[in-house]
Amino acid sequence: MKPDIHPEYDFVVFKDSSSDFSFLTRSTKKSEESIKWKDGKKYPLVLLEITSASHPFFTGKQQLIDSAGRVEKFMRKYGLQEKDEAKKVEEKKADKNKSEPAVAEESKEAHTAASS
């Protein structure tokens, strides 16, 4: 390895902020915070939003963790609009279908009256 080009690779504690799960591993992540680990030594602390302890896939629970309003933003952008637009299209089709038979019947009556 070339000297002075690689990041420092040392022990770091990662902690899940939504549960009390934490683990010690090696990483290049830097942190200003530190924590005293079970072995009595101090290690840098990196906070995480989701880990295997809080992710619904691993826990089997459906938790809604929305740290930045992403679900609401998605529903505003796609969820509600598509339903509203689909209803409008269906209503237009229904209105069009209701008016077409009446026009067809009127034209038949006019044709019958004109031929007599």
Image: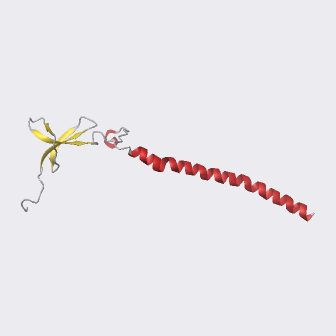
Residue 96 image point, x, y percent: 69, 55
Residue at coordinates 54% horizontally, 48% vertically from top-left? 83
Q: How is the image coloured?
A: secondary structure
Answer with left or right where residue 90 lies relative to residue 102.
Answer: left
Quadrant into which the N terminus falls: bottom left
The total of numbered circles placed on residues is 0
Residue at coordinates 56% horizontally, 51% vertically from top-left? 85
Residue 35 image point, x, y percent: 14, 37
Viewer-side residue, 88 vs 27: 88
Answer with left or right where residue 99 lies relative to residue 56.
Answer: right
Residue 113 image point, x, y percent: 90, 60
Q: Residue furthest bottom?
A: 115
Rendered image quadrant of residue 43: top left
Residue at coordinates 10% horizontally, 60% vertically from top-left? 5
Answer with left or right where residue 93 lies relative to residue 53.
Answer: right
Q: Residue furthest front?
A: 32
Q: Is residue 49 above or below residue 94?
A: above
Answer with left or right where residue 19 lies relative to residue 103.
Answer: left
Rendered image quadrant of residue 100: bottom right
Q: Residue furthest left?
A: 3
Rendered image quadrant of residue 111: bottom right
Residue 78 image point, x, y percent: 47, 50
Quadrant into which the C terminus falls: bottom right
